[in-house]
């Protein structure tokens, strides 16, 4: 529901079936493309800043701020390392630390 006093509050409400159809179309479009598949096999410098305890991973980012996860290694926190990208998803890259930790 729209918040009172906003432009959306002044608009007429769309039928639920139309909203649901549009939502499905956007979801299909989102699922139809990959954003990071070109990164598989690349070696990237990654700066590590966080730990994902639930998945036992250390989290970092590339220079382009793409999220990268590796097997948990707390010594990487606050440092950078060379990582080979092994898998990609819409949300992040998964890789293996090659070394060159700085």
Image: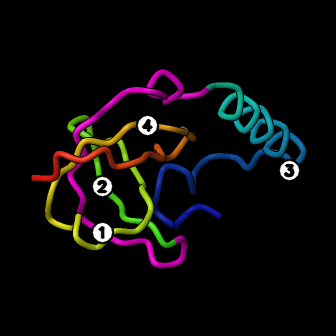
Q: Circle 2 sits in a helix, a strand or a loop, which is it?
A: strand
Q: Circle 1 sits in a helix, a strand or a loop, which is it?
A: strand
Which numbered tag is attached to residue 85?
A: 4
Residue 2 vs residue 14: left or right?
Answer: left
Which numbered tag is attached to residue 16?
A: 3
Task: Specify whether residue 75 is painted magenta.
Answer: no
- How packed is label 4: few (under 14 Cα within 10 Å), some, or many (20 or more)? many
First of labels 4, 3 by sequence position: 3
Residue 95 lies in what quarter of the image?
top left
Q: Circle 3 sits in a helix, a strand or a loop, which is it?
A: helix
- Identify which residue, 32 or 14, lies in the foreground: 32
Look at 30% across and 55% down and name the residue there.
60
Marks 4 and 2, how far apart at CA: 12 Å
- Identify which residue, 58 or 99, lies in the foreground: 99
First of labels 2, 1 by sequence position: 1
* Label 2 close to label 1 by CB (< 8 Å): yes
- How packed is label 1: few (under 14 Cα within 10 Å), some, or many (20 or more)? some
Residue 71: percent from the left, percent from the top? 44, 62
Q: Which contiguous range is marked in magenta? A: 34-55
The residue that label 1 is drawn on is 50
């Amino acid at each position: 529901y729209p918040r009172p006093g906003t432009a959306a509050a002044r608009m007429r409400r769309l039928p639920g079936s139309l909203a649901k159809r549009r939502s499905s179309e956007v979801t299909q479009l989102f699922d139809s493309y990959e954003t990071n598949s070109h990164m598989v096999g690349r070696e990237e410098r990654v700066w590590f800043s966080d730990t994902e305890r639930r998945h036992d991973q250390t989290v970092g980012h590339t220079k382009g701020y793409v999220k990268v996860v590796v097997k948990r290694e707390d010594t990487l926190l606050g440092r950078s390392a060379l990582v080979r990208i092994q898998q990609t998803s819409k949300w992040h890259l998964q890789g293996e630390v090659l070394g060159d930790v700085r």
